[in-house]
Amino acid sequence: MNYKFSNEVTEEVTSDTIKKEEIKLYDQKPTPAFIGASWIAVLAGMVSFCIGLWNAEMMLNEKGYYFTILLFGLFSAVSVQKNVRDRLEGLQVTEMYYGISWFATIVSVILLIIGLWNADLELSEKGFYGMSFTLSLFAAIAVQKNTRDKKYIESKK
């Protein structure tokens, strides 16, 4: 990185230097181990959340509520990551869609918290659903990032 301090003489920055730095920002392809770990994490989170719902002693409409929140959260988190990445790469993203993506992600987390707060579940069950939901969202973002990194690097070859 080229850090500039006010009392130091720095070299002139040319457009060639900037282009080289931009290329270096994205030239590290994710490793197969990290890609695999991300997919395993998203599947582990989703499958455990769904197995927990399947085995839970709650009404079908409650199970549907939690399952819908999982899907809503995954979609909105991936959408936020896509918007952030599009902006980073200079692609146009409308402020409305960007804001809606963030809003949807925050709302999905809040809805899960409200649902678990008011649920007639053991504290350990509430923690299980919260942690598997969090794992799923984080891993979905990692999978989306890996996909974009890989595609970006392959398109530059």
Image: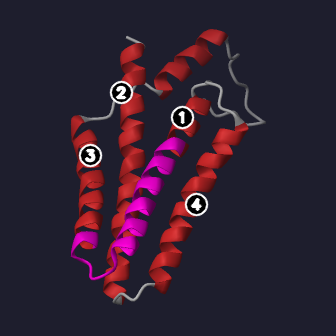
Q: Which mark is residue 49?
A: none
Q: Which residue is at a point 36% across and 33% down the rendered structure image?
A: 147
Tell me the mark number nearer the camera, choosing from 2 and 4.
Answer: 4
N-term mark: 3 or 4? 3
At mark 2, the secondary structure is helix
Residue type at tag 1: Arg
How far separated are the C-alphas under marks 1 and 3?
19 Å
Classify 58 as above or below 143: below
Q: Main secondary structure of the magenta part?
A: helix
**Which residue, given by chain and number where applicable, does mark 3 sit on?**
39
Q: Residues within 10 Å of mark 1 (few under 14, many from 20)?
A: some
Q: Choose top left, top right, bottom left or bottom right for residue 15.
A: top right
Residue type at tag 4: Ile
N-term mark: 4 or 1? 1
**Which residue, given by chain and number where applicable, does mark 4 sit on?**
106
How far separated are the C-alphas under marks 4 and 1?
19 Å
Q: Which residue is at a point 29% across and 58% down the rendered structure image?
A: 46
Report if residue 1 is visible in the image.
no
Tell me the mark number nearer the camera, choosing from 3 and 4.
Answer: 4
**Which residue, given by chain and number where applicable, does mark 2 sit on?**
150
Classify 119 as above or below 71: below
